[in-house]
Image (tube, rainbow, N blue to C red):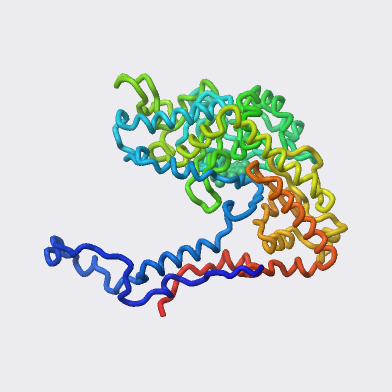
Amino acid sequence: MNKTYYSKLIFELSRPGRVGYSLPKNEFEGYSLVQLGATQSRQTKTLLPECDELTVVRHYTNMSNNNFGVDTGFYPLGSCTMKYNPKLNEELCQLPGFNIHPMTPAKYAQGSLKLYDEVQKTLAEIAGLSRFTLNPYAGAHGELTGLMVIRQYHMSRGDVARTKIIVPDSAHGTNPASAAVCGLQIVEVKSLADGTVDVEALKPLLGPDIAGMMMTNPNTLGLFETKIPEIARLVHECGGLMYYDGANLNPMLGVCRPGDMGFDVMHINLHKTFSTPHGGGGPGSGPVGVRKGLEEFLPNPKPLSNSPEGEGLYLRCEESSLGYISFFLGNFGIIIRAYAYLLSLGKENIPMAGKLSVLNANYIKESLRSHYELPIDTVCKHEFVFDGLREEYGGDHHSPEHVTTLDVAKRLLDYGFHAPTIYFPLLFHEALMIEPTETESKETLDDFIAVMKKIAEEAKADPQLLKTAPHDTPVRRMDDVKAVKEPKFTFKAL
Ligand SMILES: *Cc1c(COP(=O)(O)O)cnc(C)c1O
């Protein structure tokens, strides 16, 4: 099934003088009000492609067919929640009433402000916290905002010595990065062999210089951190706050709440859990929630009610806030999508999303453990990690001939699946991290399981087949280093 690859550049399709538009006659021709000087005018003609409309339509349609996305096939990328995003939400976020200028006076923007407030309140209920800001632009941005809340809280009490933050070794890379950007010093705490945080290793790290601790739950191995109540008690006793990385809240939806576990501050990725297409670096949203007593530190501006200006919601800036972290109210289109998603599922169905994502992950894990190495054998949440092929299929991990996780990932492409996350988390050599999400049918999961077993059999019978994969994709195995170090972005005119 060798897919053809469309590789033309629009400049190659260009023909001098060909146009795809018609404009009314310029009535002001010759009435130039301002003459640009020689230094401001370009000396050469702009290189723009000249094409007719149909050529442009075909070019971009063909190019879009090169894409692989959730809408074209199974995308089990761990730690990413590549679930299906209902098309209705795309339509709703484009309703003309929401297309308003950010400086619109509040009394004319009540609909948008009310939507913000309802999403804020719903997230607070889902998380078991008091209040959310929807202003941050991404998960990592939410982490930074949440850590700034923690710092602002300590500073407000004159507790200025708390400059360190505890981060588990299994954390997503953004955790230590956000902490560093926030000016905090990172103290790493080790994980036990079962993948959860080592409480005994945590105890000696606690003291009057600790601002708090960041935890991801389910953690990066897809495991529920069962010792959270004890950890939260220890951190609180030493005066620190608990931060919850809720980027992957999907499996917890409607099942359990970070606020009830003892967390004080958290972020959620709307673009993972609450239905916004992502993965291509597009706009995201990382709302941050806080427990009672920390609301005043959330970033400005805040839509607040009971204003002296009258009924409704108004944008307020509070003195005690950590300040601005974004323009206005964040990526508003994503907040609208989240609202549409929350309302379509409703309170009764939200827990189903979480539970089904867990069921699907465990179904794949149990179906494939005969062929792939399962380093941590327990019930997982929305995702789990294999440590490459089992020895009887892939050979000894330490031998240079063994069939690697990279080979398996490349071979999957031949069968029309997106590869799972590979070589992350760093705790295992041949990590293969699979997250199916709740939106996949049993048939899709079964197809994937059958292909993964077939690949294991191929690895045993004909390792070279995997080592030279992919075979049927438009481009074969790429030089990853060269692609990063010497990318070619420019077209040289002939
Ligand atoms: C995705 C993710 C993040 C970062 O979110 P971005 O929106 O990509 O910045 C942080 N933590 C975890 C656990 C994640 O999975």
Residue 209 visible in this rendered orientation of the protein = no
Quadrant of image for the N terminus: bottom right
Query: Residue 239 appears at what percent x and percent y?
Result: 61, 24
Q: Residue at x 47, y 44 (%)?
A: 90
Q: Picture coordinates of residue 254 (x, y %)?
A: 62, 29
Judge whether 349 appears above or below 483 on screen: above
In which quadrant of this rendering is ligand 1 seen? top right
313 and 348: which one is in front?
Answer: 348
- Above or below, 3 against 376 in this view is below
Direction left: furthest residue: 31
At horizontal 56% and vertical 36% (from top left) the residue drawn is 268
- Indicate the quadrant containing the C terminus: top left, top right, bottom left or bottom right: bottom left
Up-down relation of residue 330 to residue 396 (above or below):
above
Residue located at (41% from left, 36% from top): 329
| Residue, far front | 443
From this viewpoint, which residue is outermost toward the right? 392
Residue 72 figure quarter? bottom right
**Residue at the image point whose x is 73% and y is 36% from the top:** 197
Image vertical order of residue 312 relative to residue 28, above or below? above
Tell me the quarter of the picture where residue 394 sits. Answer: bottom right
Inspect this view and state whether residue 469 appears.
yes
For residue 464, side relative to residue 416 (left or right): right
Is 83 in front, or is 53?
Answer: 53
Task: Residue 351: give x, y in percent of width and height.
Answer: 63, 31
Residue 360: which quarter of the image? top right
